[in-house]
Each structure stands twice: as C-alpha cells, then as structure tokens.
Image (cartoon, grey):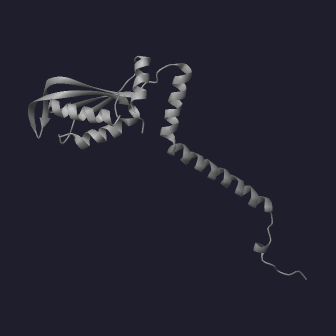
C-alpha cells in the first residue's frame, strides 16, 4: 500500500524553481544599474561633454550660461559681483551703468534706476549661483535670468571652464 505523503514535500520539477531565480537576479542587477546611472547622471554628463570636446575639439552648446541680474545700486552690484568671483561661481562679471527699469510691483507700474550684472559661468553651477544671489540680494524677488551659450570662441570657453569650479 502506498502512503499518502503531502505534495509540498516533493518537488515535481526542480527546473521551475531555478528558472524563476535567474530572471529575478537579472532584474535586480538591472534595477541597481538603473539607480546608479540616475544617481551618477551629472558626473556622467560632465565626463561625456569633456570627452566629446577633447576628441572633436568642438564646443557643446549649453555647457556655459550667461545670467542677467539687476541690482539697485552700483555698490550692491560690486559687492555681489565680487562675492560671486571670490566663490569662483563665475568666470567673469560685467557691471553695466545705470539703466531705467519699468516694472509691475504690487499692482502698479514703477520706474527705477538699476545696475545690470552680466555673469558668465558653467551651466552646472547656475542653480547654486541663483541660490547664492537670492541669499545676498536686497530685493524680495531679484531678477535672475539665465541663458545657455550656444557657441563662441573655443579659447574663451576653455578659459571659462578653468575659471569656474564645478559642483
């Protein structure tokens, strides 16, 4: 007479168990690779741009940016410009003479005299630069506008790259 043993004690097809473990391992490896790639994206992008530029000798559009920042006085503009340069957040800052600005503020059109800063930097430090300017600027809502540089002198772009410390 044959004993009735529970089926769960016997594996009917051991290949099924092994074949399901392999796809799980592959999936885990894929997920780890994806997370590492996303975490290292800024570093990989910078490295890719540098390799491309070194091999082709060409400029990659958008690697550098120009910022426009309005200041209420020349002294404020000088103080902000100097501190940006001391922190190596920009390669160059131009301070343009007094301009007349018209803008809406609290439902009214206002006129003011302002000083314009023209700041050249790496695109990778723009957000850090914007945060710094907001922290030191006397306006509640300072005008800080960034434009990527599409092209320019290779020697100048190389100088900008060397002058600005990356994040």
Residue that sits furthest to the front in the current view: 86
Does any portion of residue 2 appear in the rendered image? yes
Number of labels in the image equals 0
Query: Residue 5 appears at what percent x and percent y?
Result: 81, 79
Classify residue 7 by image quadrant.
Answer: bottom right
Residue 38 falls left or right of residue 11: left
Q: Quadrant of residue 11?
A: bottom right
Figure check: 58 above or below 71 = above
The quarter of the rendered structure image containing the C terminus is top left
Residue 133 pos. (x, y %): 26, 38
Residue 51 coordinates in the image, percent (x, y): 55, 27
Residue 63 visible to an observer of this rendering: no
Viewer-closest of 134 and 12:
134
Q: Picture coordinates of residue 99 (x, y %)?
A: 14, 24
Q: Identify the residue at horizontal 12%, vertical 38% (top origin).
A: 105
Which quadrant: the N terminus?
Answer: bottom right
In this rendering, the answer to whether 19 lies above or below 127 is below
* Residue found at the very far top of the displayed protein: 153
* The quarter of the displayed image where residue 111 is located: top left
Identify whether 132 is placed above or below 15: above
Residue at (28, 32) in percent of width and height = 145
**Residue 62 to residue 8: above or below:** above
Residue at 18% across, 34% down? 76
């Amino acid at each position: 007479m044959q004993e009735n043993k529970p089926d769960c004690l016997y594996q009917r097809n051991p290949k099924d168990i092994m074949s399901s473990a392999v796809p799980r391992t592959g999936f885990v490896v894929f997920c780890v690779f994806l997370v590492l790639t996303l975490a290292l994206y800024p570093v990989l992008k910078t490295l890719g741009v540098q390799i491309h530029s070194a091999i082709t000798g060409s400029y990659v559009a958008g690697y550098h940016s120009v910022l426009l920042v309005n200041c209420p006085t020349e002294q404020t503009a000088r103080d902000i410009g100097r501190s940006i340069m001391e922190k190596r957040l920009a390669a160059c800052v131009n301070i343009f003479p007094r301009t007349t600005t018209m803008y809406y503020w609290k439902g009214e059109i206002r006129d003011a005299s302002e000083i314009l800063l023209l700041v050249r930097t790496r695109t990778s430090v723009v957000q850090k630069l914007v945060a710094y300017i907001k922290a030191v600027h006397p306006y509640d809502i300072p005008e800080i506008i960034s434009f990527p540089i599409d092209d320019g002198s290779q020697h100048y772009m190389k100088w900008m790259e060397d002058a600005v410390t990356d994040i």
